[in-house]
Amino acid sequence: MPIFETLIGLALMAGVLTRLASFGGAVFMVLFWIGNAAFTNGLVNGDFMGLLLFVTVMVFAAGRYYGLNAVIEKTRFVEQRPRLRYLLG
């Protein structure tokens, strides 16, 4: 698990595979949120806020504007395969 957390963080910081990394982070945060099932203070806690953050980054694909995804999407390989743009974010 720490390896995947590190890879997700590095991918988000570099702006590479932003959507995929955000999806992985959202899955982790759902598992942490459910695993922290002591909802004594309500449903909203730090894990839920992290989940919302990952979903926001996934939806808006932040790496497309300020990351290496912008450089990767301009390559001929990605231009010939437009489906990769959705994965890259």
Image (cartoon, rainbow, N blue to C red):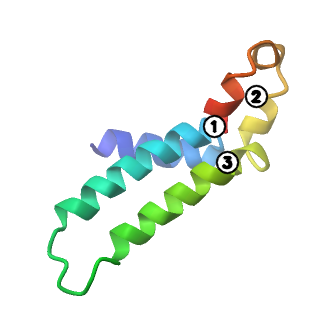
The type of residue carrying mark 2 is Ile
- The image position of residue 89, as x and y in percent, is 67, 39
Residue placed most toward the observer, 21 or 5: 21
- From the image, tell me which residue sits under label 2: 72
Q: Verify CB contact (< 8 Å) between mark 2 and mark 3.
A: no
Q: Residues within 10 Å of mark 2 (few under 14, many from 20)?
A: some
- The image position of residue 63, as x and y in percent, is 70, 46
The quarter of the picture where residue 4 lies is: top left
- From the image, tell me which residue sits under label 3: 61
Q: Residues within 10 Å of mark 1 (few under 14, many from 20)?
A: many
The type of residue carrying mark 3 is Ala
* Residue at the image point whose x is 62% and y is 51% from the top: 59
Number of labelled discs? 3
- From the image, tell me which residue sits under label 1: 16
Q: Verify CB contact (< 8 Å) between mark 1 and mark 2.
A: yes
Q: Residues within 10 Å of mark 3 (few under 14, many from 20)?
A: many
The quarter of the picture where residue 85 lies is: top right
Determine the secondary structure under disc 3: loop
- The image position of residue 39, as x and y in percent, is 19, 78
The quarter of the picture where residue 64 lies is: top right
